[in-house]
Amino acid sequence: MQNLTIKMTKIELRQMFQNKRNLLKDDDIDHLTDKIIICLSEQLNLENKKTHIFLPITKKKEINTYKIIDLLRTKKCKIIIPKSDFKNNTLNHFEYTSDTEIKITEYGIPEPINGIETSINDLEIVFIPLLCFDIIGNRLGYGKGFYDRFLSTLSEDCLKIGLSHFDAFESLLPIDKFDIRLDYCITPNRVYSFI
Ligand code: ADP
Ligand code: MG
């Protein structure tokens, strides 16, 4: 019985998980981020990878990915960050270097305002934001399908890694035909593998 699809809509689930997140204080986010970094560095090989990662939307209490980027830099990773196109609900991609200027957009998203738009053909790892995920790697995002569109363009070999404040939801999430599953999800408590 436990693994049946939950009878809640995506909208209700998003609200529930954003509400749960909103109870977290800045210190909690820092602490959860540090625990995620420990799980990540202990259990995944990050050396020298071409890596895509989002910058954190503070008002949505996202994991502090600036700290994860610091870790990735020590591992000599190349860092690519997204810039959202809200007309098409798609992402464009930019190399993130010490020269990249970041500005917070009207949506509260830190995004590059200059820099080199870059190819995503040979990406090896993508870190993915989410509101919740389940025990088979289904993922619920913010509801615009940005990442489903982006992930559908990547090679099979690219690892799709979710970052989550909370452990897996105990029931299966509702999904539709465009939803793309995660390969891994990192939480402050553990690494889930779905491959
Ligand atoms: P999220 O993944 O952000 O939680 P949804 O999965 O609900 O959001 O997707 C939002 C909308 O985007 C849905 O109507 C979905 O059908 C659409 N969508 C997602 N991926 C694609 C795609 N690759 N092509 C066309 N539409 C897509
Ligand atoms: Mg989706």
Image (cartoon, rainbow, N blue to C red):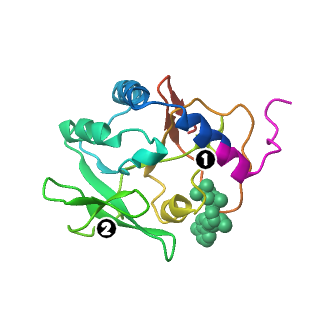
Amino acid on which the number 2 mark rests in the picture:
Ser
Q: Choose top left, top right, bottom left or bottom right for residue 155.
A: bottom left
Question: Magenta-highlighted stretch: main secondary structure?
Answer: loop
* Residue depicted at 51% across the width and 70% down the height: 89
Q: Which residue is mark 2?
A: 119
Depicted 15 relative to depicted 167: above or below: below
Q: Nearer the viewer, mark 2 or mark 1?
A: 1
Expressed as whole percent of the image width and height from the top left, the position of residue 150 reads 48, 63
* Residue depicted at 79% across the width and 34% down the height: 3
Left or right? Give the position of 173 relative to 194: right
Depicted 169 relative to depicted 62: above or below: above
- Quadrant containing the N terminus is top right
| CA separation in Å, label 2 and label 1 | 25 Å
* Residue depicted at 47% across the width and 69% down the height: 90
| Tags 2 and 1 touching, CB below 8 Å | no
Left or right? Give the position of 187 relative to 101: right
Left or right? Give the position of 161 relative to 167: left
Q: Residue furthest right?
A: 1
Expressed as whole percent of the image width and height from the top left, the position of residue 6 reads 79, 41
Q: Would residue 95 be counted in the magenta stretch? A: no
Which mark sits nearer the N-terminus, 2 or 1? 2
Expressed as whole percent of the image width and height from the top left, the position of residue 178 reads 64, 62
Q: Residue furthest left?
A: 99
Q: Which residue is mark 1?
A: 139
Q: Choose top left, top right, bottom left or bottom right for residue 136.
A: top right
The boundaries of the magenta stretch are 1-15
Left or right? Give the position of 174 relative to 164: right
Amino acid on which the number 1 mark rests in the picture:
Arg
